[in-house]
Image: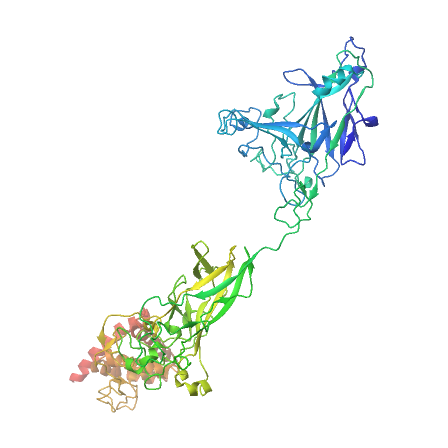
Amino acid sequence: MSHTIGPLGLVQFPFHFQQKTDNPNNLYTVDIVDDPNVTSPQGQPGAGIDSAQIELGTGKPFYTITIRPKDYNQLICAGDFKIDGLSSSWVYNTDYLVPGSNPNYTFQYNSPGCYPFNPPWYGSGVNQHLRHSTPHSYIIKGAGLNNCWGPGSTSGQNFTGNGTYRFNGPFVFDNSTYCDGDFLTSSKPLTWRKIILVDMYQLEPPLAVYLNAMFTPDQEPDLEKWIIATPQDTQNLFGYNTILNPGHNSYPAFVRAFVFPEQHPTNLLEANMQIDIDIDLIAPVSGCTDQGANNYDATANRNDGTCIFPPPPEYSITISETGTATGGLYTNEYTNNTFSGTAPDRNLVFNNDGSPVVLANTYAAGEIVNETISIDLVPQLDQNGDITVFNFSSGTPQGNIPQTLGYSNRGSDWGDAKNNLTGASIRIQNTGNPSVIRVGSLAGVTQEFSEWHVQVDPTGYQPEKTTVFDVNPGNGTFTANLATPDSNGNALLITTGTTGASTHSGISIVEHYHPSGSPEVVAQPALEHFPYKLELIIEIKDFVMPAEDIDILMVIDHNTENQGDPNWTSPSTIYGCTNPIALNYDPAANTDDGSCILPIYGCTQHQATNYDPLANVDDGSCTYPTGSKILCATIYESTGLDDWEEKSRLWNIHLNKHLTKYHQIGYHTLFYQFTLLMKKYKSIFKLGKYMTVQRSKDLEAVMNNDKRHLPGMVIRYIFEPICYVVGLIKSKI
């Protein structure tokens, strides 16, 4: 694209700023300047080119003009111009990036290392450019001060080339061949010898200043010290972040040109002289510059937004299982082996036939995965093709737990049933926490007990139809996970969960049963009590897909030691009463020593008319010669509170365990008339109600081993000693 300057396509000399050229075919305007001093006859005062600026050190005149874009829809930069058909050259000296080597610097620079700073328009994004549109000869040099180039560097030499490498300037156009040749034989009095082009960038408001304005020939003649800064090169300017004017699309605000005129040695200067300067902007080659696109154009240097990309590769997720036992006591011991050969190490088949599960959805790298996967875990098949689910020896579930190390209660009732596949018998070893989490402790999850386990075991719990592995914090983050090796053998953590507010890990086992009386149950009665399959549910939550196929390798342990409640761990032998309903039940005991005392309900109060000497648990039925119940219970009953029956039993237990007959005689002596008065007077009723309620609260705290209730405790320690003394005295009279 050609641009001529001045009337009839010329630049006028002498110069001062006067107007701009404006060719409608071009994307920019150029200043026209005038220097009136050449009107003086040569040899007279004021003659010559005297209105120009003077280069420092050489005394050579130059003029400054501006090449300004009409808009910022296309890049107008110094490196894309040719002048009078000439290409430019540039030099980049890395030595001047060494601190203290360049006194002209007023900014702090982020050093690009051994190569020039990238212009802000550089890149493969839309409307960005990869390189200039016209080639230049260039030298990247240095004395080796920063170990990049020169004899003192690792390479031992400078780097020279000719091409379209990106650069901010200064670009130098040298017209010496013409000046020292054809110009000398011409009749023209004036031409140009050198033109320097520099890109000028403007910062956004409030600064709105132009970077690099200090680099001019009259201030610094050594162009190698003109290290042209752009916002990504500077860290801070006058306390402001350096950001380009957003209206310029990362392009220069304008191009500054320094024109050095050359006067003919013998031809006289004339009035209204004109110099032809042909400025060509070499248009970029637009196209797709992204090498990853289907339509990448290697000849293009400007991305016009036409790139067409292939869809990103998508990767699969597979869930498989090791298929091997991982340790412990496994289901390979049977009293009645129904397998055609040796019993398998475990009574479990993954996904019905052992095959992996491949998810239907595939994902690109970086996509978020949220999937719920359901996988059946079923028992092995015996020699007849039936699933190996064994019944209790008695035909019904009677035992609390199976016969396992440390426990012996009713183990014989289980027989081969202990080898059945149940939720409690499963451990998933590749979770962050393989321990079973009780569903009853998870908010919002329904608790159902397994049908094969009819009572609580010595832990105080019993197995549930749903078991959960690992736990989330419940604060919106997901820490539960399944660990699996990635393609490099490193651990890859697959995050799991349900909702942000739930502590549920999203990794669970659910037991499934046939309904009672179904054909399956009729054909195989053990299915009346035991699940015919387990459902493994994995809820992948907010997992970021890597750039590879994933195989989630499940490590599932089926262990007969785990057939009881998940909170149980095999203890050493502890003798005691193991019957939970016995009065002397010992929850720590795991071996019954025959010492259990079963409850016998009745009246245990000696002074009662219906005292039962065989009873060891007072049922609150005692009556006394007055025809009333135990006095303390009668007082509470008179309060009219709904829970008087429950509190009466509480008082009777307390009397049986902690009070003597003297206490009881004293209570009757002191409070019998008080009870009658409660029915007559509101004030006494309120006092009696307050005392009995507070005293009952303290009794509950004592029974439950909780923190004592202070008002009730004070009432006890005041009245119980008094009642004892009164009862003792009265019994002696």
**In this figure, what is the number of numbered marks?**
0
- Residue found 65% across the figure and 42% down from its top: 298
Any part of residue 62 in sight? no
Quarter of the rendering containing residue 389: bottom left
**Depth check, front residue: 716 or 99:** 99
**Depth check, front residue: 523 or 270:** 523
Quarter of the rendering containing residue 174: top right
- Left or right, 483 with respect to 60, comes to left
Percent position of residue 137, x then y = 64, 28
In the image, farthest residue toward the left = 732
Percent position of residue 484, x then y = 43, 60
Percent position of residue 226, x then y = 61, 26
Q: Is residue 670 above or below residue 176?
A: below
The image's colouring method is rainbow
- Left or right, 441 with respect to 616, comes to right
Quarter of the rendering containing residue 246: top right
Quarter of the image for the C terminus: give it: bottom left
- Left or right, 399 with respect to 375, comes to left
Percent position of residue 705, x then y = 30, 71
**Depth check, front residue: 546 or 406:** 546
In the image, farthest residue toward the front = 341
Any part of residue 130 in sight? yes
Quarter of the image for the N terminus: give it: top right
In the image, farthest residue toward the right = 8
